[in-house]
């Protein structure tokens, strides 16, 4: 497995963890342009909602 893929998986899991921990904050971000980023990678809050609801895979 490539290092980039592992880092990408870790970032997505960390973003999902932040979404679940601070759910009240993220529920109020209704604009589809809101993203979580570490400077190089990014994930949309809308995508995190879909993952959390089981509509998309991590």
Image (cartoon, rainbow, N blue to C red):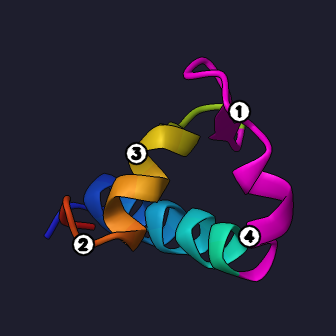
Q: Which of 35 and 46 is in front in this view?
A: 46
Element on which disc 1 rests: loop
**CA separation in Å, label 3 and label 1:** 18 Å
The mark that comes first in sequence, 1 or 4, is 4
Q: Is residue 29 highlighted in magenta?
A: yes
Q: Which picture quadrant has residue 35?
A: top right
The mark that comes first in sequence, 4 or 2, is 4
**CA separation in Å, label 3 and label 4:** 14 Å
Residue 2: % across, % down: 20, 61
Residue on which disc 2 sits? 54
The mark that comes first in sequence, 3 or 1, is 1
* Badge number at residue 39: 1
Residue on which disc 4 sits? 23
Element on which disc 2 rests: loop
On screen, residue 35 above or below 5: above
Residue 11: % across, % down: 53, 62
Magenta residues, start to end: 21-38
The mark that comes first in sequence, 2 or 1, is 1
Element on which disc 4 rests: helix
Element on which disc 3 rests: helix
Tell me whether circle 3 and circle 1 mark residues in contact (CB < 8 Å). Answer: no
The mark that comes first in sequence, 2 or 3, is 3
| Relative to 27, 15 lies left or right | left
- Callout 2 environment at 10 Å: few (<14), some (14 to 19), or many (20+)? few
Q: Which picture quadrant has residue 42?
A: top right
């Amino acid at each position: 497995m490539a290092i980039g893929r592992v880092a990408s998986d870790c970032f997505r899991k960390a973003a999902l963890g932040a979404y679940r921990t601070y759910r009240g904050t993220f529920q109020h971000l209704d604009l589809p342009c809101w993203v979580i980023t570490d400077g190089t990678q990014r994930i949309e809050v809308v995508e995190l909602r879909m993952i959390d609801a089981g509509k998309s895979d991590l």
